[in-house]
Image: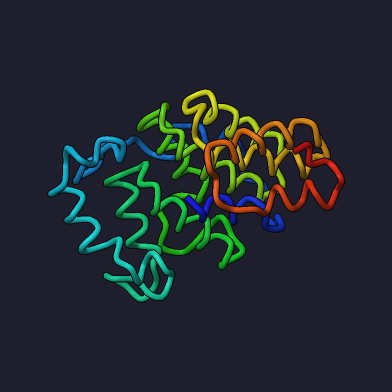
Amino acid sequence: MRILAILIVMVPFFTPLSVTAAKNKSYCGELQNAFGPFDYMERFNHPGQLSIVETHHFTSNVENLIRGNTSSTPAGDLDYTLRAWPNHHRALATLVKYSIKEKSTHINGLKWPVECYFDRAIRMNEKDAQVRSIYSAFLSHRGRNKEALEQLEVAADLEPDNATVLYNLGLVYFKQRNYEKASQYAEKAYALDYPLPGLRNKLIQAGKWRR
């Protein structure tokens, strides 16, 4: 969860991909796959299938972007993981980091542009709040703050007691200088024992912390 909070505050540099294209099933591909697809929200019901992918493709080297397990780069293994498990949370977070590292949304070895993997993840399970949070971080990096906020608001509706979502909402509102709402969501997040002090410190420095 800490990854999501860190991702959302970094500086954007991406060139936007057409939203219409990303939401076109023919552009981003059907979900049906030779192995899967499996819903990551139901992963505890499919431990064997998850183990196969995480043992042979989504390894620690891939997650840490050191190298691929079946090729020299992590791209092919990330693609395989996210075709088998479209809403695999850690794989999606890794994909965002990979896009940041490569400074691109079109990475060699990936079947689709990065945003397509979020389109597919949402189609896999529209009620997966974690996917919405990670997607929001991706959009924020690309300077699409309005869309980032929309995704976080969906996540908050799905999981109103998710401290990480509330914290990230506070960060977005702080970036927009909407200190009232930033404080509101900060208070909710810290009331749920969110551990990172960053948002509170920002509000204190701005003279907007209300407690």
Nearer-the-camera pick, 124 or 17? 124
Farthest residue in the left direction? 48
Count of numbered circles on the image: 0
Q: Position of residue 163 (x, y in %)?
A: 53, 38
From the top left corner, tell me how far across and down residue 3 is, in percent. 51, 55
Taking 11 as reference, is 122 above or below it?
Answer: above
- Work out which residue is located at the far right of the displayed protein and give it: 207
Image height check: is 209 above or below 90? Answer: above
Residues 166 and 50: in front is 166
Q: Residue at x 62, y 42 (%)?
A: 168
Q: Is residue 179 left or right of residue 73?
A: right
- Residue at (35% x, 42% y) in the render: 86
The quarter of the picture where residue 121 lies is top left
Q: Position of residue 9 (x, y in %)?
A: 67, 53
Q: Residue furthest toward the front?
A: 211
Q: Residue furthest top?
A: 157
Q: Position of residue 158 (x, y in %)?
A: 47, 25
Q: How is the image coloured?
A: rainbow
Question: Would residue 162 appear left or right of 80 to someone viewing this image?
Answer: right
| The C terminus lies in quadrant | top right
69 in relation to 52, above or below? below
Residue in the picture at 42% in, 27% down = 126
